Image (cartoon, rainbow, N blue to C red):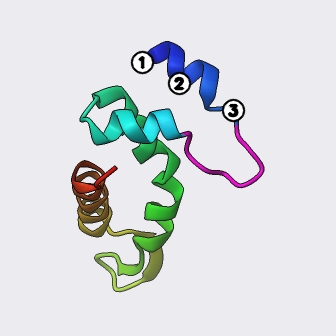
Amino acid sequence: MTGMIDANTKDNERGLLPYPIILAANKGEPEAMKYVILHYGSYMTSLSMRRLYDEHGNTYWGIDVDTHERLRSKLMQAILAFKI
């Protein structure tokens, strides 16, 4: 699996995941799943950004960890359930 990631994951112009990675992740290979999660990590982070409050009532933007973990979990479930 490691050789496949190194050989086939050069960024293409559309930012798509290579088919062998998708296929391996769908079969439950942990390294491929990690790669898919890494690929979508920044998108999940941007979806998880929320206005948060500190103990003094000041507002700031931060990552809602619960939302981020739910998105990660849903992505993993969708990958495993996807019919190829």
- 76 or 66: which is nearer to us? 76
Q: Which residue is mark 2?
A: 5
Q: Secondary structure at mark 2?
A: helix
Do the residues bearing badges 1 and 2 touch, measured as CB atoms within 8 Å?
yes
**Residue depicted at 48% across the width and 75% down the height:** 61
Residue 49 % position (x, y) = 44, 73
Is there a contact, CB below 8 Å, between mark 2 and mark 3?
no
Could you tell me what secondary structure mostly forms the magenta stretch?
loop
Q: Which residue is mark 3?
A: 10
Q: Residues within 10 Å of mark 3 (few under 14, many from 20)?
A: few
* CA gap, disc 2 and disc 3: 9 Å
Q: Which residues are magenta?
A: 11-18
First along the sequence among labels 2 and 3: 2
Give x and y (percent) for residue 28.
24, 35
Reply yes or no: does residue 78 show up in magenta: no
Label at residue 1: 1
Sequence-first tag of 1 and 3: 1
| Extreme residue toward the right, this view | 13
- Disc 3 residue type? Lys
Amino acid type, residue under disc 2 in the picture: Ile
Mark 3 falls on what kind of element? loop
